[in-house]
């Protein structure tokens, strides 16, 4: 009887360990799925900028006035506040052009809602002695908790290439 009780105790401990492993695995798979979905969302947004001319990449200044603290508290905004690039909206520029909103809510392939923040700043090449490039940073955050960042993609766009 004692041996049976010891065997059942050992088996119960083993089953609890296996259950904990499965639970941890499910959480890891869920996180990996969300990370890949948000990375794909950020890459798709960046591809939109690669499809337009350099001179029309930007954010309308009126749209930046309405953003919240999550947007303005990001390092991509704070470190370059004086150098933000603003362009006119499509009404004044030839197509294709950008009517980028600094913050937008998009649905990912997993059906969840994500917040996509776009930052566009001027940056000089070679420490100020070179030409300007536009640095576009896309940050994808959780739709229900904007403090949780899932993906960040940045790319520079050079005027000499035209794109």
Image (cartoon, rainbow, N blue to C red):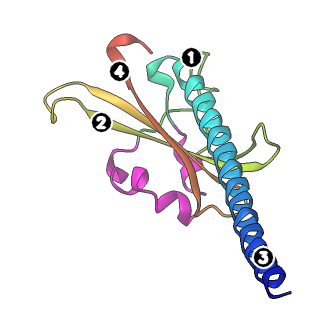
Residue 81 is a magenta residue: yes
Q: Quadrant of residue 134?
A: top left
Instruction: Return the residue at label 1.
Output: 51
Q: Earlier in the sequence, mark 3 or mark 4?
A: 3
Q: CA distance from mark 2 to mark 3?
A: 68 Å
Instruction: Return the residue at label 3.
Output: 7
Instruction: Return the residue at label 4.
Output: 158
Query: Where residue 114 sits: x, y (%)?
Result: 70, 49
64 vs 23, left or right, is left
Q: Earlier in the sequence, mark 2 or mark 3?
A: 3
Secondary structure beneath dot 1 equals loop
Mark 3 crowdedness (10 Å alpha carbons): few <14, some 14-19, many ≥20: few
Query: Where residue 11 sits: x, y (%)?
Result: 77, 71
Query: Where residue 26 sits: x, y (%)?
Result: 73, 54
Mark 4 crowdedness (10 Å alpha carbons): few <14, some 14-19, many ≥20: some
Q: Earlier in the sequence, mark 1 or mark 4?
A: 1
Instruction: Return the residue at label 2.
Output: 123
Residue sitting farthest toward the top: 161
Query: Where residue 8 sits: x, y (%)?
Result: 82, 77
Q: CA distance from mark 3 to mark 1?
A: 66 Å
11 vs 56, left or right, is right
Q: Nearer the viewer, residue 80 or 5?
A: 5
Residue 65 in view in this figure: yes
Secondary structure beneath dot 4 equals strand
Magenta stretch in the rendered image: 59-84
Q: How many marks?
A: 4
């Amino acid at each position: 009887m004692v041996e049976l009780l010891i065997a059942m105790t050992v088996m119960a401990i083993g089953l609890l360990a296996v259950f904990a492993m499965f639970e941890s695995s499910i959480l890891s798979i869920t996180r990996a799925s969300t990370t890949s979905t948000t990375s794909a969302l950020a890459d798709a947004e960046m591809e939109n900028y690669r499809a337009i001319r350099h001179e029309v990449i930007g954010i309308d200044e009126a749209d930046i006035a309405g953003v919240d603290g999550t947007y303005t508290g990001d390092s991509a905004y704070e470190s370059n506040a004086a150098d933000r690039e603003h362009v006119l909206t499509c009404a004044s520029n030839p197509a294709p052009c950008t009517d980028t909103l600094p913050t937008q809510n998009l649905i990912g392939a997993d059906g969840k809602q994500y917040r996509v923040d776009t930052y566009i700043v001027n940056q000089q090449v070679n420490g100020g002695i070179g030409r300007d490039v536009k640095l576009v940073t896309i940050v994808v955050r959780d739709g229900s908790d904007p403090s949780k960042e899932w993906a960040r993609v940045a790319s520079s766009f050079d005027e000499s290439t035209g794109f």
